[in-house]
Every structure is written in structure tokens, then in C-alpha cells.
Amino acid sequence: MLTGANPAELARTHLAGAVLREQGFTVTIEEARLGQIWQRLWAGKADASVTVWLPDASAPFVERFFDRLDDLGPKGTALAEESEIWPVNDKPHTVVRRSLEQESPEALAILRSLHWQPQDVTHIINSWQQSQNWTLAAESWLAEQAPSESVKP
């Protein structure tokens, strides 16, 4: 998975990674700038990103790279901190390489069903500030959730 570098993007990405790991998938997370995220997904060098800002921030990349990618839509709302960074109408979307559907329909189903609230992301960021470990912060948050309250699926 590819992620941007701001804390909310890292929290969302590590949360998605924790959910995938919980279901038995091997997950590698790498930081990349927005243009690099689009290029690496398009080239098949990464499977997904939950931090692709659409529609305005990614406008230069959509026409060039979208023929091999699928937009699974926004999975929650952006934190106030992020609203200052990205265009006002943008939201972080989950974008995957189109071939993921054939190669790993289970992983795609998980990514498609993920949703989080701003307080989930804030909690993970706060946990990271104590542990300095994004994976641990996301996995701890996930473990604390009752099954019915957990990030979906």
C-alpha cells in the first residue's frame, strides 16, 4: 500500500493494513508523493492507496493513469489539519490497480468495505505519538474495538 506523509494519511493507511493483516494478507506500506502514488499503482508496482485526494488535487493524474485503476470512493471524512493542505472539495479516496480484482478479490472486498470516522484516525494518531509505531497504533486501535464497532468489514 502507498501512503502520503501527513499523520492522518499514515493513520488511515496503517489502519487499512491492520485490517488486511488481520485477514491473513501480507502488507507492505511505503510513503510516496501523490504523483508517485498514481504512477506506481498504474505500473502495477503497488496494489492500493487509501490516500488519493480527489477530485481536484489528482486532476492532472486522472486522465493519464486512470485506465488501469479503480476508484473505490472516499472511506471517511478528512481531518481539519488535512483540509488546510488539500483543495476544499477533495476527499481521500481508495484507489486500487484494476487487476487486483482478478488477483485478490478478497483483498479488494476488504478495501471496498473499509470506512472510518475522524475520531478513529485521531485515536490512532494519538497512540502513535506515544508509541512512535504506526503499525502498533493501528493494530492496538483495531484490537480495542468490539466486533460490531470495528472498522468494517
Image: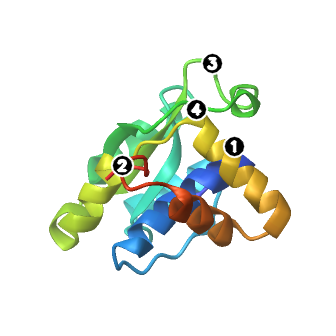
Q: Which mark is residue 88?
A: 3
Instruction: Kindly tell me whether residue 140 is visible in this rendering.
Output: yes
Q: Secondary structure at mark 2?
A: loop
Whether label 1 touches label 4, CB < 8 Å:
no
Q: Amino acid at mark 3?
A: Val
Residue at 31% x, 53% y is 153
How far apart, in angstroms, are the residues tagged by discs 4 and 3? 10 Å
How far apart, in angstroms, are the residues tagged by discs 1 and 4? 23 Å
Q: Amino acid at mark 4?
A: Ala
Front position in the image: 152 or 1 = 152
Report the mark closest to the observer, 4 or 3: 3
How far apart, in angstroms, are the residues tagged by discs 3 and 2? 32 Å
Whether label 4 touches label 3, CB < 8 Å:
no
Residue at 22% x, 66% y is 106
Whether label 3 touches label 2, CB < 8 Å:
no
In percent of width and height, residue 58 lies at: 52, 36
Q: Quadrant of residue 62?
A: top left
In percent of width and height, residue 91 lies at: 52, 30
Report the mark closest to the observer, 1 or 2: 2
Q: Quadrant of residue 102?
A: bottom left
Nearer-N-terminus badge (4/3): 4
Q: Secondary structure at mark 4?
A: loop
Q: Which residue is mark 2?
A: 148
Residue at 63% x, 49% y is 9
In percent of width and height, residue 93 lies at: 45, 40
Report the mark closest to the observer, 3 or 2: 2
Q: Secondary structure at mark 1?
A: helix
